[in-house]
Image (spheres, grey):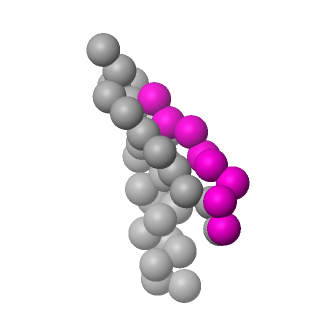
Amino acid sequence: MRNKNVIQKFNEMIEIDPHLQSVLVPIDDGMTISKVKK
């Protein structure tokens, strides 16, 4: 359960960061890919 909480917090942080563009790829349990906006 502990890893789940860390992953959720990470996803929340990158979701609200205005400098990042992110997408959730439906591979296995899901993989988040982010890049810095220019």
Q: Quadrant of the C terminus?
A: top left
**What predominant SS class does the magenta segment belong to?**
strand
* Count of marks, rendered view: 0
Horizontally, is 19 left or right of 28 in the view?
left
Residue in the image at 50% along x and 71% along y: 5
Position of 13 relative to 20 (above/below):
below
Residue at 45% across / 29% down in the picture?
21
Any magenta on residue 6? no
Say above or below: 12 vs 37: below
Q: Position of residue 6 (x, y in %)?
A: 43, 69
Residue at image x 55%, y 56%? Answer: 31
Q: Nearer the viewer, residue 5 or 30?
A: 30
Give the farthest residue toward the front. Answer: 27
**Quadrant housing the N terminus:** bottom right
Question: Where in the figure is residue 14, as x and y percent of width and height?
Answer: 42, 42
* Residue range (magenta): 21-28
Residue in front for this viewpoint, 32 or 8? 32
Please tell me in which quadrant of the rendered image residue 26 appears: bottom right
List x then y, in percent, for residue 25. 62, 49
